[in-house]
Amino acid sequence: MFSNINLKRSSYQLLVMLLVGAMILVGQRISIGTPITTALPGMLIMICAAMVAMMLKDLFPKSLFPAFGFATILGLLLSLPSSPTSDFFVKHVNNIDFMAITTPLLAFAGISVGNKIQELKAMSWKIVIISLVVFTTIFFACASIAHIVLKMQGVI
């Protein structure tokens, strides 16, 4: 069962995650002043969760479920109030600023799109229409969910 895990690729993924984690910690220190030692445990927990998600993806190669989905479910399970890991997990991960994570993430997404520029050119004007429909749909879906949640909480 564990033969599907490629140790060479997993070690490369771990190295990349550690480097990105270091970038996030330094960026967070510069932007909001959180000491690296305060945020380090939360970053290591996030890296461990991401590595487990990547290995789960390797264990189930025929699954259409992406590694990001595994990471999301793992984070949900670790942070559920009924989970024995909840207090520890939430306490340490709360020290990581969301915006510090998005900066390198968006940079890597831009590099990824840049590597596929020829494929984007082949889609021509159709990609613009698809993007506008997707962005608009997501915006209204998020706004609707936020409205429902805020209404249920009595905020609005």
Image (cartoon, rainbow, N blue to C red):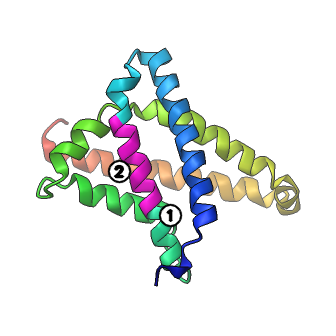
Residue at 44%, 48% in the rendered image: 47
**Measured along the vertical axis of the image, is residue 47 above or below residue 101?**
below
State the image coordinates of residue 150 (x, y, percent, origin top left).
Answer: 22, 42
Q: Nearer the viewer, residue 65 or 61?
A: 61
**Secondary structure under the numbered disc 2 in the rendered image:** helix
**Measured along the vertical axis of the image, is residue 51 above or below residue 35?**
below
Tag shown at residue 130: none
**Measured along the vertical axis of the image, is residue 148 above or below residue 94?**
below
Q: Nearer the viewer, residue 32 or 85?
A: 85
Residue at 59%, 70% in the rendered image: 6
Residue at 61%, 40% in the rendered image: 106
Do the residues under discs 2 and 1 have CB atoms within 8 angstroms? no
Residue range in magenta is 41-52
Position of the C terminus, as image quadrant, is top left
Tag shown at residue 54: 1
Q: Would you say residue 49 sits in the magenta stretch?
A: yes
Amino acid at the residue labelled 2: Ser
Q: Nearer the viewer, residue 24 or 72?
A: 24
**Secondary structure under the numbered disc 1 in the rendered image:** helix
Kindly identify which residue carries mark 2.
144
**Measured along the vertical axis of the image, is residue 20 above or below residue 67?**
above
First in sequence, mark 2 or 1: give its number.
1
Q: Would you say residue 47 sits in the magenta stretch?
A: yes
Residue at 88%, 57% in the rendered image: 118
Nearest to viewer (mark 2 / mark 1): 1
State the image coordinates of residue 28 (x, y, percent, origin top left).
Answer: 46, 24
State the image coordinates of residue 35 (x, y, percent, origin top left).
Answer: 37, 19
Q: Quadrant of residue 107?
A: top right
Number of disc labels: 2
Q: Nearer the viewer, residue 123 or 117?
A: 117
